[in-house]
Amino acid sequence: MQFPSAPPIFIILAMNLSKTDPQIYTLIQKEEKRQKDCLNLIPSENYTSLVVREALGSVLTNKYSEGYPGRRYYAGNKYIDQIEQLAISRAKELFGAEHVNVQPYSGSPANLAIYFALLKPGDKILSMSLQAGGHLTHGAPVNLSGQLFQFIFYGVEPATGLIDYDEVERLAQKEKPKMIVCGATSYPRVLNFQRFAQIAHHIGAYCLADISHVAGLVAAGLHPSPFPFADVVMTTTHKTLRGPRGAIIMSKKSLSDKIDKMVFPGLQGGPHDYQTAAIAVALKEAQTPEFRIYVGQLVKNCRVLAEELKKEGLTLVSNGTDNHLLLIDLRNLKITGNEAQDLLERANIIVNKNVIPGEPRKPWDPSGLRLGTPAITTRGMKEREMVQIAQMIARVLRQKDEKTIQKVKKAIKTLTQNFPFPK
C-alpha cells in the first residue's frame, strides 16, 4: 500500500498494537466486527467520526493541565489552553450559553459538581423518578446523589405516560426544594424547560436541565432549548451530540465561579485534554448543515420505527415518541426485559432492558425495552429500513424460536453491510 507521505498515526498505532499486545488488538478487532454486524438501537450510543477518534488517540493524552486556561498549575499548557478555549467558545455558540465548563469526565460527576456547587448535603431536590424515566444521578437511592441529598420525585401520568406539570408544581409548592431537575434518560417526549424553570424560580429554587439525551436535538433546533430559562444545564457529549464520552456544564455567568471551583479542585484533578479536543471537534461538526440534516433524520426514523412497532402489535409507553428514543412495554407479550434483550442480541439487534412507568418488576429484570435511532441513522439508514427493523424485532419477540432468530440475524448482517459506520 502506497502513502503519499507518512501513514496516519492511527494506522501506525494499530500496526504497533498488533505486535506489542496481540490479545488486546484481537479483542478490539472482534469488537469492531461486532459493531459492524449488529444493529445498534441503544439510544445512548452512537458512532463518532474518524476525526473525533483521531483527537482521542492523540499526544494530548501525555499532558497534565490542572486548572483553567491561563491559570494552570503545570507549565507547558500554551496549546492546551487554546484547545480548551476553542471547545468553550464552540459550546457557547452552539447552545447560547453564558458560561461553559468542558472539563467534567462524564455526566455523573458533572451532576454531582452542580449539586455540590449550589447546594449543601441534605438539601431537598425535586427530580424525575427512575421508574418514570429519570437518571441514576437524579437521586436514585443506590447512587451517591440519593445518599447525600434529600430527593423527592415526580413521575408521569399512568394513562398517558406524560409529565403532569401541574403535579410538578404542586409538589414543588408543598416540598419547597432548593433545586428542580428536568431531564431524563428514558422519556420519549418533549421536555418543557420553560415551565420547569418557572416552577423552580417561583419558589426560589435553582433549575437544572440535564439534556444529555436530547443535546443533539437542541443543537439542531429540533427540541426546545433550556436557554435562557434554566440556571444551569448539563449534557454529556456522546449520544445524539455524536462526540466522545465526556460532559459539559453550562450556566448563567453569575454561577460560573461556584461551578468551576467545584469541578476543579472540588471533585476532579487534571482534565483529560484529548477528550477536550475531541469534544471541540464534535461541537464543530454539530454546527454544520449536515449535522442538522442528520438529527432531522434520526427523529423521523424514530417516529417511523414507533409507528411500525405499533402496527406489529407492540405497546409503547406514551404511545409514541417526539425525540430519538422509545420505550416498549412488553407485558402483553408475556416476556421480560431480560429475555427480550437476550433474544434480540442473538439476532444481532442490540437494545437495552428498561424499567417502565409503574414498573411491577425488579430493575435488573424489568418489563420494558428502550430503543433509539442515533447510531443507525449515523450509518445512513432511513424510513424504509425502520419498517424492516420493526418487523424483525416483532418477529423475534413473538416467535422466540431459534429458526426465526437465525433468519433475522442473517437479514441484519445483510442490512448492516449496506450501511457502514465511520471508520
Image: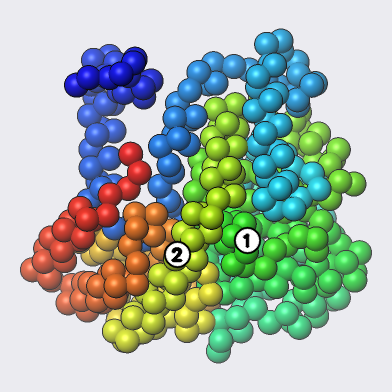
Amino acid at pointer 2: Leu
Q: Which residue is mark 1?
A: 218
Q: Residue at x 23, y 64 (%)?
A: 343
Q: Position of residue 368 (x, y in %)?
A: 41, 72
* Quarter residue 9 falls in: top left
Asked if residue 161 is positioned above or below residue 325 in the image, the reply reads: below
How many tags in the picture? 2
Q: Position of residue 191 (x, y in %)?
A: 65, 71
Q: Residue at x 77, y 63 (%)?
A: 180
Q: Position of residue 187 (x, y in %)?
A: 55, 70
Q: Residue furthest bottom?
A: 159
Q: Residue furthest top?
A: 75
Q: Residue at x 53, y 59 (%)?
A: 292
Instruction: Please name whichever residue, 101 or 8, is drawn nearer the observer in this view of the structure.
Output: 8
Asked if residue 67 is positioned above or below residue 283 in the image, the reply reads: above
Specify few, some or many for label 2: CA neighbours under 10 Å numbering under 14, 14-19, or 20 or more.
Answer: many
Q: Secondary structure at mark 2?
A: helix
Look at the image and tell me in which quarter the C terminus lies.
Answer: top left
Specify few, some or many for label 1: CA neighbours under 10 Å numbering under 14, 14-19, or 20 or more.
Answer: many
Amino acid at pointer 1: Val
Q: Residue at x 42, y 51 (%)?
A: 46
